[in-house]
Image (cartoon, rainbow, N blue to C red):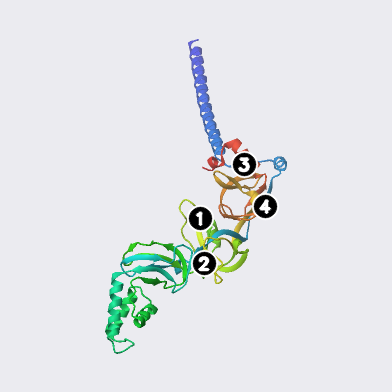
Amino acid sequence: MKMKIIMKEKLFNFKLLSALIMITLLSISCKKQMVEITNENHSQSTDNTLSLSKAQIQLADIKVVQAKEGVFSYDRQFTGVLKVNEESSVNISSRATGRVIKLFIKNVGEKVNKGDSLYEFFCDDLISAEKQFFNLQSNNWNYNGKYEPSLVLENKLLLLGMFPVQIEKLRKDGKILFAVTILSPVNGVIRSINISEGQYVNSGQTMFELADDTKLWVEAQVHPEDLGFLKVGMESIITIPDAGNSSLKSTVSFINPTVEQGKNVTVIRSEIENKNKKLYPGMLVLMHIKSEKNGCVIVPSSAVILDKNGCSVWIQNENNTFSAKKITTGLQSDDLVQVISGLTKSEFVVTSGAYLLNSELILRKGNIADANK
């Protein structure tokens, strides 16, 4: 009897132990499955891919085309302005210390020819040099005065600002000029006047700034993405609305390698002739440039989605899945966009229904930018 009781107790303990083992194994299995499900859900939450059935694709009217490599035609018209040719700019400085008695040129923009009167100048050093030169000429047996002391004084007068014609007049007339008229040494347009009547000036002080107006600069602003299509020497057509919409052929002579701070633009320049003097700095101009660039990845404009995070496209994968990809775009025409990076020519992009896919992804998983992180 005791033997049967012992056997029953052992059998009960064995069944109890087996049950505990089964419960433990089942618990471990459930935990493992829960981890796998959690990982799978986490993977899906960070994925930017959507899976659609054929019926859903048809209902959403989703259409795709293959990105292609081709020639992107560049045809742009930039707004610009006529400017003074800075390379022709000339500063006229005082040759001596003295006082400005009278100004003959008082307005910026006036045209000046070589030999025109600029200002009347009183200078003690100049008067003293005139007297020395005249006395030397009076005592000189050689009328031409081409001996060393005379040449030295003549050079001194030239250095003080007198013209050869004024020195020759002094030689012949013998009249000392107490107020010497300073003449322009070049042709040009007055850019700035830095003196006034009655002003005392020092030797070397800038009086006027002139520039040649027979050639003018055309400067236009362009965005950095245009620079890949522009190069020095390419042809440009310049149209000037205020000059009867006349068109002039020119070439790009300079491309500024830096971008203006805070404006995200740079400057390109060409040069035009102004022989008839009918064009003036400050006039509005239009600069038209055409070129082509080979080897570009091109997609239809309808494929590109633009939002606060930048540009993106939807591409079609196998098994009716679609993925969002961020891209960097370049130039854009009416119906095509150049893709600089983020897409290859072998991929198929969604051209119709892209915004529906984008909205669906945002509803399911949040912003695309968050999904791409």
Residue 65: give its label: 4
* Residue at mark 3: 358
* Residue drawn where x is 63% and y is 54% of the image: 299
- Asked whether disc 1 touches disc 2, contact meaning CB atoms under 8 Å apart, the reply is no
* Residue at the image point whose x is 33% and y is 80% from the top: 174
Mark 4 against mark 1, which lies toward the viewer? 1
Q: Which residue is mark 2?
A: 216
Per the image, label 2 sits on a secondary structure element best described as strand
Neighbour tally class for label 1: few under 14, some 14-19, many 20 plus, Cα within 10 Å: some
The local secondary structure at tag 1 comes to loop
Please, what is the three-letter code of the amino acid marked with disc 2? Leu
Closer to viewer: mark 2 or mark 3 = 2
Residue 152 appears anywhere in the view: no
The amino acid marked with disc number 3 is: Asn
Q: CA distance from mark 2 to mark 3?
A: 52 Å
Give the distance between the C-alpha atoms of the residues marked 3 and 4, in whole angstroms.
18 Å
Q: Are marks 2 and 3 in contact (CB under 8 Å)?
A: no
Secondary element at tag 3: helix
- Mark positioned earlier in the residue sequence (1 or 2): 2
Residue 366, position as x, y percentages in the image? 57, 37
